[in-house]
Amino acid sequence: MAGGFQIEIERQVGSEFSARSGAMRPPTFAYAGVRLWSDEPMIQIDPQTIIIGHLFSRGPPSRRIVSLSPGEGQRLAADKARLLLDGYWGGYLMVRIDEAGAVRILRDPSGALPCYFLCEADRITLAGDIADLASPAPGQVDFEEIARVIASGDARGRRTCLKGIDELIAGECLVIDRSHVSIKPWWSPWDHIDPPPEMNFPEAAVRLRETITDCVGTWASCFSSILLGSSGGLDSSIVAATAAPTAGRLTCLTLFGPDFDGDERRYAAALADFLGLDLREASREIEDVDITRTARPHHPWPVVPLGAQTNDAIHRRLQQELSIDAHFSGNGGDGILCSIRSAVPFLDRFLAEGPSSALSDTLRDICVLTGADKITVLRHAWRRYRRDGGRHGVQYSASGLCADVVARIETNGAMHPWLAAPDDVLPGKTVHTAYLMRTQQGVELYPRAVSPPHIAPLLSQPIVELCLSIPTWMWISGGLNRAVARKAFEGRLPAIITRRTHKGGPGGFDLAIYRRNRAALLEHLRGGLLVDAGIVDTTLLDEPEDRSWRGTERIQHILALGAAESWARWWSAPRI
């Protein structure tokens, strides 16, 4: 199922400029200096307005929109398509050229359709794949930005790690008005953090179940054959339960590694048996991993681990057998469903409601969740409150990075607009919004032009907006993280899933990669571009091996640096 898009906008209407690769064929849409090529679904509202991607009406029940009546199209066009944000949702990009020639391009709040842009003297080009905006060449990589994303998951902004290429952040509108270019935040998480009047825990669970069932089911109805990454964790299991009724064919895939934590087949099997779904099991094979190769060169940030190469190999093999139309996952679930483990919900409830017996319940819930006693939790809450009112603060790690680079990054601070919280919000919502921001980084598995799209349906706008409005203390009710979601799908998933509190992962496989490739990996870094650019401090590489948790943490840092090095080399070497 081919996809992808490219948009070219003349900086001065009527000027002549050479076209990029998209112009090897006639444009799909053209108007007044704007040309668009797309293999995504499209809805043309009028000669000046087009939507690319998937669009759904607000539900429940939501429905797929493949065309608009003249009256509805005129309403959207007259409103410069702002009504999309209230009456619709999906994974889309809206392009609108007004009578004065100003161009507005809106990316939907879910970020389901990637969008990057490059500003040049004669044009502005947008695409869903950065390979359509840049070619590998010396000087192409922004090493300072690589250091930023390595130092902190919160430090990035809209800049990618390729020079001159930025991301249009979800919910933003790019406005090109003659020679002036600006970005407007048409949607912000801060507009959705207030809970509805009298919301209680049972009501929140019911609303969440209805909203997730509607959104995931609507997404699933768009594809005839879906491959779902299923670990047996809560998030992917919720996606499975709500996608199965409307999907043409839903196949679950669970990957297992060499250690107990990396083998979650028992959970995935329980889910598949409960829902009556086909389950495929595949072993992570270390032979699939080449530490000198980047797993996802089309990603604009080098954050994909080396071990993802085994996922890619397994997907390629299954693609031949199953004719997959889309990859689904529970990606982003931890952040959207507010998997929080701190004293912040206590602060939120105290600031919102004052002292009460309910506040004591939240204190108890935090103790059960974290294993800490009440005095420890209260001390932590007080220390956190004294530090900027308990609000989320960006944390930086200097491990493996040169000190002067980290100092510059810390001085610049957070770059993402969602981290600029209003003054009057509860501290827990600054944490929740930071979680949401992290889910947006590189959601695309593979280039859409050659591979099925990746859909993370829990990122759907109605789900995100509802989750943001649910108070943080409800999310930890009963001492369980994501408690509202657990309650919402109680009885609709096996109890082994909804009551599961320990989550496995590929950590054991990562350690196997390191041990097998240790010498080559260290040499890869010592003689690499990140060292030459003054980004990596080789002191980390020279430390003795340590079998404690500290040693495991060091290994994970080295693997992350190795992945970034391979990505930087791919983009720095011209393709032959």
Image (cartoon, helix red, strand yellow):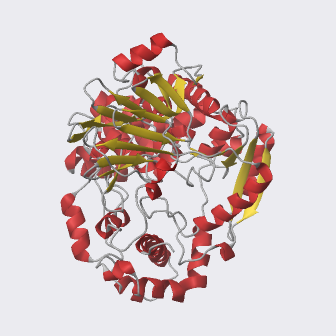
Residue at point 53% right, 31% down? 42
Figure disc tally:
0
Percent coordinates x, y for residue 354 in the rendering:
28, 30
Residue drawn 45% across and 62% down?
Answer: 303
Depth check: 197 or 455 in front?
A: 455
Residue at horizontal 61%, vertical 67%?
309
Q: Establish if 320 lies above or below 201.
A: below
Q: From this view, report whether residue 248 is shown above or below residue 146.
A: above
Q: Judge left or right: residue 280 versus residue 28.
A: right
Give residue 142's position: percent from left, percent from top: 32, 66
Q: Which of 1 and 120 is in front in this view?
A: 120
Q: Which of 515 and 218 is in front in this view?
A: 218
Q: Residue at x 45, y 29 (%)?
A: 50
Q: Visible in this render: residue 107? A: yes
Q: Nearer the viewer, residue 445 or 385?
A: 445
- Residue 502 position within the rendered picture, expressed as x and y whole percent measured from the top left: 60, 54
Say if residue 169 shows up in the picture.
Answer: no
Quarter in which the N terminus is drawn: top right
Taking 295 as reference, is 76 above or below it?
above
Q: x%, y% of residue 556?
A: 48, 72
**In which quarter of the view is residue 445 placed?**
bottom right
